[in-house]
Amino acid sequence: REGAFVGCYFYIYEGFREAFFNIFGGNSPFAVPMAGGLAGASSWFFSLPLDCIRAGVQGRNLTDPVKKGAIRVFQDLLKTRGVLGFYAGV
């Protein structure tokens, strides 16, 4: 979870920071905070579905004869709750 978040965060942050420096100029006090905020929100958008799948794998019933791995949890979530099911709890 954290690895996916941090990887996305820094990649997106650098892109936003460069774009804001180009738009507002290199001395803008708003470029870094805006880039950080947008990168954080975007990173959670990408990493929350992975966390939801992880929780589904970890919370499975161990006595159930059908093993549910990440792909099976992904398919079940998509079938039962749709795309918004990956953002449950937000």
Image (cartoon, rainbow, N blue to C red):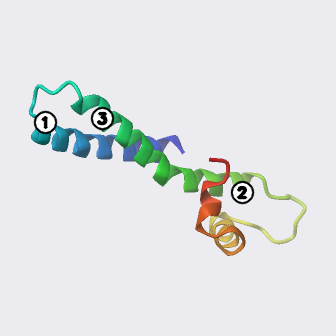
* Sequence-earlier tag: 3 or 2: 3
Numbered disc in front, either 3 or 2: 3
Query: Label 2 vs label 1: CA separation?
Result: 44 Å
Count residues near mark 3 (Cα–Cα under 10 Å), then give few for <14, some for 14-19, many for 20+. some
| Local secondary structure at mark 2 | helix
Q: Which residue is mark 2?
A: 56
Give how far across and how far down residue 40 sits, in percent.
41, 39
Picture residue at 10% right of the left edge, 41% below the top:
22
Figure quadrant of residue 36: top left
Residue at 25%, 30% (x, y): give it.
32
The residue that label 1 is drawn on is 24
x 69%, y 68%: residue: 81
Name the N-terminal-most of marks 1 and 3: 1
Closer-to-camera residue (60/33): 33
Residue under label 3? 34
Identity, as a three-letter code, of the amino acid under mark 2: Gly
Q: Mark 3 belongs to which amino acid?
A: Met
Q: Residue at x 38, y 47 (%)?
A: 8
Left or right, residue 47 beside residue 65: left
How far apart, in angstroms, are the residues tagged by discs 1 and 3? 11 Å
Q: Quadrant of residue 80?
A: bottom right
Q: In the rendered view of the protein, which quadrant contains the N terminus? A: top right
